[in-house]
Each structure stands twice: as C-alpha cells, then as structure tokens.
Amino acid sequence: MKVGILGGGQLARMLVEAGTPLGLDFTIVDPKADACAAGMGRFIHADYTDPDALDCLAACDRVTCDFENVPADALAVIDDRVAVRPSAAALAAAQDRLSEKDRFTRLGMETPGYAEVNSRTDLQAAVEALGLPAVVKTRRMGYDGKGQMVLRDAEDLELAWRKLGEYPLIVEQWVAFDHECSITAVRSGDGELRCWPVSRTWHRDGILRLAASLSVAESRQRAAERLIRTLAEDLDYVGCLTLELFAVGDRLLANEFAPRVHNSAHWTIEGAVCSQFENHLRAVCGLPLGATEARGASVMVNFIGRMPAPCPWLELPDLHWHDYGKSAREGRKVGHATLCAPDAEALKSMLPRLDGLLDSDLLRELDSALGAT
C-alpha cells in the first residue's frame, strides 16, 4: 500500500520507520529541502499547494499529515481523490484555538476560562473577566511556546498587544494545576478506539521537555479515556489523536488536542506493545489495531536546540536514542531519548544516571512523581 505524508518533519520520519516493516511505501512532500524525513521513501521538495506534488499524493492509497497546520486548500484539492486520514475537517478543527475551546465546551469538557480578543479593548475586558496571570495566544499557528505571552501584571497588556495584536487572539485563564498530562488514542475507520496509558508531561517555555508513562489511578485513566473518546467520536476521527490536559485535584481540564502522532507519546516506540506511529498507520490503512498496553515504566527526554553526545548515556540498559538529523537551533526539537524499565521502582533507581542529560529541576520532579506512584 502507498501512503502519502504531507509534511516531512521528525513525525514523518518516525512514521516511515514504523511503516516500512508493514510493507508500506511512502511519498513525502515538504517545502524544506533539508526536511529530516527527506531520506525516507520518495521525497518531493515542493510547496504544500504545488499541483504536481498534490497529484503524486493523490495517486497514493492513503494520505496523512505529520502536523495539523497544513493549508486547507491543499487538502481540498485531493480530498475527493484519495482517502485523507485523519480528515481535512479534523485537521482544521485543531487549527484555531478559539474554535477548539468552543468544541470542548460544546462537548461538556471542562476547560480553563477563555475569551476571544480582536481589539485592545477586548484584551482589557478579557483580563478583567479572567484575572491575572493569564496567557494570551494567537488563535492560529502557535506551537512550542511560539505566538503566546504570559500576562502577569497590567503593564504586560500593552507589550502583548504590540507583539501579537495584529493577529486574532485568545486569552486563557492561568491554571494552578497539580500537573500536566496527556492521553493518546488510536481510532480505526470502523470506530474501534484504543488508548495508551496517560502520559505525565513537563513543559518549559511552552516546549515539552519530558514525558513519562507512570502508573496513574484507574479512575484518572478512565476519566481521560472518556474525554478523548468523546472528542474522537465527535470528529469522526481516524488515526492517532492526543488530548493535552491539566490535572487539578480530581478534575481534568482540556487544554489542546493534536490530530496526529504526538511528542508526549514518543515513549510508546519502545515502551508500549504497539507504538503510536505503527498504530496510526494501521488505522489510516485499515489494518487491525495493535495493543496499546505499556511494557513497564518509561520516560522520554526531549533534546532542544542541539543533540548531546550519545556517550556515556548509551551505557544505560534499555535507553533508546533518537537523533532527528536536524541542524542545531535554539528552541528546536532535534531528538529524544527514552529510558525503559520493568516498573516505576526500577525506573526511579536509574534516575541518578540521567544527571547531566536532564535538567536537575526536572530530574527532581520526575523522582518525586515516581515516588508517588
């Protein structure tokens, strides 16, 4: 079966790595000549809306995307010629933060308070209604901390408006969460849905730094599964879907969703029976879904800006190294490593050996989280 991928980043790279053993052939389109999936399968260096490139994708059996912000016009050109999974409508649903929050609200999912902002007066009114601190974000295209600013006091409003005011905005209430987490699910074309264990996540400057598969209360797992099932069914979704959440006491607040394979579930490559990448392709191609159970406890460390030298870390038993082949750049995800262990106790005992690979504050927080399982 031939699979087209619109977007050639690290997610496309890992999709190809997972799909090649399934006998799948890939065609990848990306406007960057040095896209890190360029050496994986047939690579077409072209704009997302290039007619010839889209014709090549339309000749595939299935088309998927490695990020949600592909131009809607590109998908519209091929949507009636080839099965696009997830659908163009599902991708579009994640492209606007305001409509995303409105969808959560319509589905009965609790969210942080939020307000639409189209003027300086709207910004002032939103802050008065929601309080400070708050977060102002562009409604479209922001990711990994881009296109957003924390408002801590009244003086920040003018700076935020000068920086972001030319775009449609949303202001979100600041949440004093206990921790962040996410759940990833895969849904087949006939509606079967399977969930991986909830991932505990840590962000710095809006970028995911750490994700761990730890034991959580059965009630928390089931609550997260109910939320993502509700969302997936509403979107009539096919493929992998991730819902990012704030845990506040016994409550789970919906933050964002990603209609694709997701960074917080990279640990599933080595830490689950079937990875998110393989299961995404199974769903997209109409193949039986794989098991989503964790093999034990896992922690995934993101490398931001530059890759560290692999030694001495590769001496760790069951540590798995992923270099995306990207050039160094501040704020850029260039790779990750996943450390697996039979259980949380064994993983906790190995944490001192991550000193130097992982920031000390994150190491302490991870150690504390493992101690609480």
Image: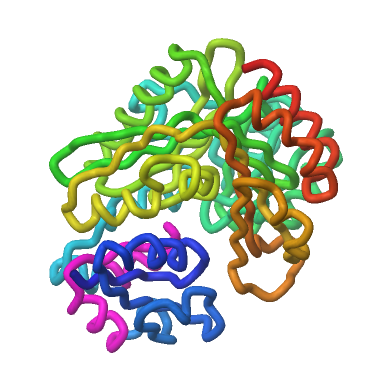
Residue 223 located within the stretch drawn in magenta: no
Q: In the image, what residue occupies the spot 54% across and 58% down?
A: 141
Whole-percent x, y for residue 139 in the image:
53, 50
Quadrant into which the N terminus falls: bottom left
Q: In the image, what residue occupies the spot 46% across and 68% down?
A: 13
Whole-percent x, y for residue 73 in the image:
32, 70
**Closest to the observer, 87 or 139:** 87
Relative vertical location of residue 120 with respect to residue 285 in this rendering, above or below: above
**Closest to the observer, 48 or 321:** 321
Relative vertical location of residue 338 with respect to residue 224 in this rendering, above or below: below
Whole-percent x, y for residue 36 in the image:
53, 74
Relative vertical location of residue 163 with respect to residue 249 in this rendering, above or below: below
Q: In the image, what residue occupies the spot 52% across and 86% down?
A: 33
Count of residue discs: 0
> Can residue 124 be seen in the rendering of this structure?
yes
**Closest to the observer, 230 or 125:** 230
Q: Left or right: where does residue 24 sit relative to residue 316?
A: left
Q: Left or right: where does residue 44 sit relative to residue 34?
A: left
Quadrant into which the C terminus falls: top right
Q: Left or right: where does residue 181 sit relative to residue 224?
A: right
Residue 61 located within the stretch drawn in magenta: yes
Question: Which segment did they paint magenta?
Answer: 51-75
> Can residue 129 be seen in the rendering of this structure?
no
Whole-percent x, y for residue 349 in the image:
73, 29
**Closest to the observer, 179 or 127:** 179
Quarter occupied by residue 333:
bottom right
Quarter occupied by residue 28:
bottom left
Relative vertical location of residue 47 with respect to residue 323 in this rendering, above or below: below
Q: In the image, what residue occupies the spot 30% across and 37% down?
A: 232
